[in-house]
Image: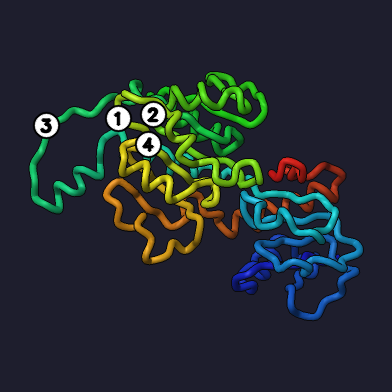
């Protein structure tokens, strides 16, 4: 019985991790010789179309990350459960990122960075308190809810938006298209944590930004996107920053990655760029999680975090 590692980066570290956690299994690598009939599971990221075909006894695909958009749309994707990684390590890292950047915007830290560089002393403006700032989180799953709880602890007024209705203790949750405009109208800091699907591609655009709250405590709406790069229309972000529709943006993901050197996002004074590391999956924790899922399944339990292929997440 084999686990196939099918990734677009160096495979040997992953082989070694899985061998530690699954010592009774053969760990094989795409591109090398192996018995296709023996493969029961695949751990993958960004495989080429067709590379996962011809595995007659495959029982599950594991995505080596929280997202699965790298698999969706493949015409020959095996008809087996797709399991995404959803581990505490990744969740906590994302919440740390959100608390950090919401506080940086609240306390106007970028202005003080500029003042330090210029040796300029300007203690002239007291920032608002967190309770005066309304945060809206688009994508209110595991990551969104954990971020919401921690931001609420800091005092922020937090609400969520989800594609389908859900009830989360302690939070107002808007849902669907009918809930989107009222959700945006009450939002000073918009956090995007949605998966990438045909419905969400390009959703962070001028039309959406124009519905964000006006006259809030921060002087204008702020965008934080750590979901997927293709959720955003970068030309719209830039033009909305320039004409005041957006006050600032923190972007961890981009339409093209790595972010091209000639992108104006690098140098825009009201954009904070981070290199898609808001919640990097820690490899050892990821390998351990996938191995635990295999053990659970073989003990007669269901896989956790199985992707709904219709919804795409």
SS label for mark 3: loop
Q: Is residue 261 left or right of residue 301?
A: left
The residue sitting at 42% across, 50% down in the picture is: 235
SS label for mark 2: loop
Mark pair 3, 4: CA separation: 22 Å
**Mark 3, residues whose alpha carbon is within 10 Å: few (<14), some, or many (≥20)?**
few
Q: Are the residues at dot 1 and dot 4 in contact (C-beta closer than 8 Å)?
A: yes
Instruction: State the residue position of label 2.
Output: 188
Instruction: State the residue position of label 4.
Output: 222
In the rendering, at what x and y percent does residue 69 appear? Answer: 65, 52
Q: Give whichever of discs 3 and 4 has the lower sequence position.
A: 3
Q: Give whichever of discs 3 and 1 has the lower sequence position.
A: 3
Q: Give whichever of discs 2 and 4 has the lower sequence position.
A: 2
Q: Are the residues at dot 2 and dot 3 in contact (C-beta closer than 8 Å)?
A: no
**Mark 4, residues whose alpha carbon is within 10 Å: few (<14), some, or many (≥20)?**
many
Colouring of the image = rainbow
Mark pair 2, 4: CA separation: 6 Å
Q: Is residue 38 left or right of residue 192?
A: right
Checking the image for residue 124, the label placed there is 3
Q: Is residue 6 left or right of residue 216?
A: right
Checking the image for residue 218, the label placed there is 1
Question: Looking at the rendering, in which quadrant would you find the C terminus?
Answer: top right
Q: Are the residues at dot 1 and dot 2 in contact (C-beta closer than 8 Å)?
A: yes
């Amino acid at each position: 019985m084999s686990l196939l590692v099918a990734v677009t980066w160096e495979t040997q570290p992953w082989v070694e991790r899985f061998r530690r956690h699954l010592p009774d299994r053969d760990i094989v690598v795409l591109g090398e010789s192996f018995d296709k009939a023996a493969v029961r599971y695949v751990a993958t990221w960004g495989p080429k179309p067709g590379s996962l075909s011809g595995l007659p006894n495959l029982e599950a695909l594991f995505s080596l990350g929280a997202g699965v958009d790298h698999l969706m749309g493949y015409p020959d994707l095996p008809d087996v459960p797709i399991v995404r990684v959803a581990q505490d390590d990744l969740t906590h890292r994302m919440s740390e990122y959100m608390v950090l950047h919401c506080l940086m915007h609240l306390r106007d830290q970028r202005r003080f960075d500029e003042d330090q560089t210029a040796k300029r002393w300007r203690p002239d403006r007291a920032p608002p308190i967190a309770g005066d700032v309304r945060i809206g989180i688009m994508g209110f799953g595991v990551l969104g809810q954990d971020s919401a709880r921690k931001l609420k602890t800091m005092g922020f007024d937090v609400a969520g938006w989800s594609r389908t209705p859900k009830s989360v203790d302690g939070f107002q949750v808007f849902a669907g298209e009918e809930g989107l405009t009222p959700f945006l109208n009450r939002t000073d800091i918009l956090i995007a944590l949605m998966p990438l699907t045909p419905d969400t591609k390009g959703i962070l655009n001028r039309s959406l930004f124009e519905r964000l709250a006006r006259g809030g405590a921060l002087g204008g709406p702020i965008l934080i996107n750590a979901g997927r790069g293709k959720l955003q229309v970068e030309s719209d972000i830039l033009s909305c920053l320039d004409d005041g529709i957006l006050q600032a943006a923190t972007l961890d993901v981009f339409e093209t990655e790595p972010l091209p050197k000639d992108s104006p996002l690098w140098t825009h004074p009201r954009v904070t760029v981070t290199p898609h590391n808001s919640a990097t999956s820690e490899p050892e924790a990821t390998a351990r999680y996938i191995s635990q899922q295999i053990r659970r399944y073989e003990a007669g339990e269901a896989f956790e975090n199985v992707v709904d292929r219709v919804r795409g997440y």
